[in-house]
Image (cartoon, grey):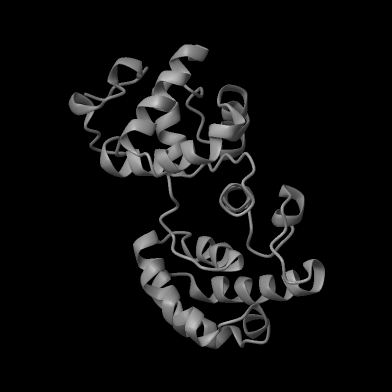
Amino acid sequence: MKTESQVRDIIETLKSIYPDALCSLQYDKDYELLFAVRLSAQCTDERVNRVTPALYARFPTLESFAEANPKEVGEYIHSCGFFNGKSRDIVACAKALIERHGGKVPDTMEALTALPGVGRKTANLILGDVHGKPAYVCDTHCIRITGRLGLTDGSKDPVKVERQLREVLPPEESSNFCHRMVLFGRDTCAARTPKCDACPLRHLCDNPQT
């Protein structure tokens, strides 16, 4: 595992490369991000961003989603895959937000994960991006790269990785750090063909692949 100084070096290096640590999913309203993350399961963010403008134009309010026929929602999100389940979750989630939370996206892990289709990864993203709270979004990029770097023990279990990251990352850095993991994973530390020779974190990596 890394020392506190090494963790800081990793954080600062990534900050210098990606000063704007932004979620790649596009949204205007808080609940739109919640729905977009559900659509992103087994789908690229790029594809989701192509689909959501028409979806949100057809259903411009949370109430319109709550009153929607899941079958019609599914027609708009068909290309995202698993559209039947996703459309049911979105409609059910909209109803739950109105009935339980007055139309607001809640700000606790417990309340978020009680919503239809919302797991810890989604909840963490909402806590960080919407509510500005410490958040540890353990997607495939984050799990892979933090394991290679030695920030975690290499576990593939998202809950275990989240717990380990909570122990080593400063809370105020956590949300942006996880966004930078996604960007770094796309640019450099890919799953199958990482660019280790050109990696700015190679000297801090426990498991260089080449």
Q: Position of residue 91 (x, y in %)?
A: 64, 77
Q: Position of residue 105 (x, y in %)?
A: 69, 62
Q: Nearest the camera: 173 or 2? A: 173
Q: Is residue 36 above or below residue 129?
A: below
Q: From this viewpoint, which residue is outermost toward the left? A: 197
Q: Is residue 9 left or right of residue 123?
A: left
Q: Is residue 183 above or below residue 43?
A: above
Q: Quadrant of the image for the C terminus?
A: top left
Q: Is residue 50 above or below residue 40?
A: below
Place residue 85 in its image quadrant.
bottom right
The residue depicted at 71 percent of the width and 62 percent of the height is 115
Q: Nearest the camera: 87 or 31? A: 31
Number of marks: 0
Place residue 195 in its image quadrant.
top left
Q: From this viewpoint, which residue is outermost toward the right? A: 100
Q: Position of residue 22 (x, y in %)?
A: 43, 49
The residue depicted at 59 percent of the width and 83 percent of the height is 70
Q: Position of residue 16 (x, y in %)?
A: 34, 31
The residue depicted at 25 percent of the width and 34 percent of the height is 194
The residue depicted at 76 percent of the width and 55 percent of the height is 111
